[in-house]
Image: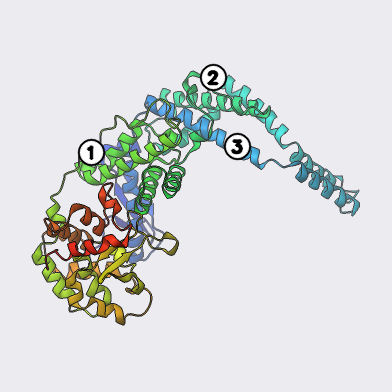
Amino acid sequence: MPRANHISRRRNSNIYQVRLRVPLDLVESIGRKELTRSLGTPDYAEAKKLSRIVLAGWAQDFDDVRNRRDLTEDDLQHAMTDHYRSQLNRDDQFRQSLPTGNEIDAERQQVVQRVMAGEFDVEEPLAMLDASIDFLTLEKRLKLDQKHRACQHDEMKRQVAEGQTDLMRYAADEFIVRHRLSIDADSPAYRQLCHRLARGEIEFLKRTFERDTGNFGGQPSDPLLHSASNGPTIRTTFDDIITEQEKQSAQGIGRNVAASTIYKYRGQMKGFTDWRRSTQAATVTKAEVERWRDTLLVDGKNRKTARDKVGSLRSVLMWGQKQSDGKLFPNGFIMEHVLMPTAVVSDSAVKTYTLADARKLLKAASERPEPHFRWLPWMAAYSGARIGELLQLTKADIIEISGYHFYHIQHDPENGRTTKTKKSRKVPIHPAMITEGFLTFVSEAADGPLFTASRAYQNMTDWIRTEVFKGRTGPRPAPSHGFRHLFQDLRFGKISQEGSDYITGRASTGSAALYGKSDAMLPELAKEMAKLPII
């Protein structure tokens, strides 16, 4: 077996090490031409496994160094406001943790009881002193903190006046790492960053002195923080915004937001906040969004993905802006002038099954004994419904109205049943399905869900791609999209647009919104469904 050239034994040892040359463009930044690390094992196979982890870490380090950038004015403003706001948040938490009068009285009584019980040896006065100090610390916690903050405020002002950086180095170093900046600790840029952070700290301390007197409405006097607010808006996280929008949507306020959209946005915002290492929405800047956009556009590729993610960020931040009455970004919406990646629009035919595809798939499905393989393709083909919605059907959902049969696709979140439009609908069963024996399958099925196999949708999708269309090199549409698009093509001239939107569960604000409000409408819809050509 050939040996990896990056693994070797350490000198005068049987322990393996991993070695890697530093790329020429990074030698100056990293300060070394080669990296080495002991793998701590004499076993070659184990060393090879461990080396992959080390090499992957170094590769990530190289990317981080390449992605470092110079400090900008936006960074300085971001650092100052973010530090100011996070410190205010910390002060909120501190004040909420202060002991109540009852808790102080209870601690005092406990000390008295311990003295009366003889727990303290009179020959060891330090034990009594320790107990007294613990109680006094609890009782005087706010006053002790006030004295500490006063000293800190005076020292911070002195350091700012003298251009010193000692007190804010911890915050500067954290900000540099979080935002992948290339700043030397002895550079003017580093001192400038510490200076801005110190100004934010001074303003924070001023707010705490006001809070000590009961004034929680103070505003910054520093012109660089003048527009900032210390209300809850500045500490709003992305998750706060999405949760509030989900709540409003459930209450029927504003535009309806699908559960799948909420789930998608949470995942994408998690990716963004992990990248920027901050969950606070108010601190996002235009420059930061543009940097994230550019990292998504690797070598000019991934344009559709990048556009989708940046678009999701825009939507969530706009939700936050509306929820806060414009206070999230008081100087204007920061994404108003962000240029979006241009996605290549694909031909819808790529997502559509051809008639030949549909016939081949339905023939293959009719030969399978498993209910989800046997019936889901047929049901999707003759309804255009999403397979995820069909999977939720139970035996009781197959109903008869005026001699016609329907799937009752229900939106019932409390029982784990959802639709994308958050509306229930009754979909006519096509005559071809009845001829195929679907109603017989239903009558013989046990009460409850019609499809009980685990991973039914994924297994069906895998079967279609690896067996039904085995060896195909061209487009391979997903079952839901493939049949939904084909249904739209086949219904043309046969089923009205309003009827089609209702049957397939597409959002509509026109007359289709009336469908299903009365069972009296459904027989006419069933007659339209019967016009759909037999595949």
- The residue lying at 63 percent from left, 22 percent from top is 154
In this view, the residue farthest toward the left is 356
Q: Which amino acid does label 2 sit on?
A: Ser
Q: Crowdedness of circle 1 by 10 Å Cα count: few (<14), some, many (20+)?
A: many
Image x and y of residue 226, in percent: 49, 21
The residue identified by callout 1 is 341
The residue identified by callout 3 is 92
The residue identified by callout 2 is 221
Label 3 sits on a secondary structure element that is helix
Chain-order first, disc 2 or disc 3: 3
Label 1 sits on a secondary structure element that is loop
As drawn, 209 above or below 372: above
Q: Is residue 9 visible?
A: no
Q: Which of 73 and 243 is in front in this view?
A: 243
Which of the 4 quarters of the picture holds residue 402? bottom left
> In the drawing, does residue 6 fall left or right of residue 486?
right
- The residue lying at 40 percent from left, 45 percent from top is 274
Q: Which of 344 and 420 is in front in this view?
A: 420
- The residue lying at 62 percent from left, 27 percent from top is 152
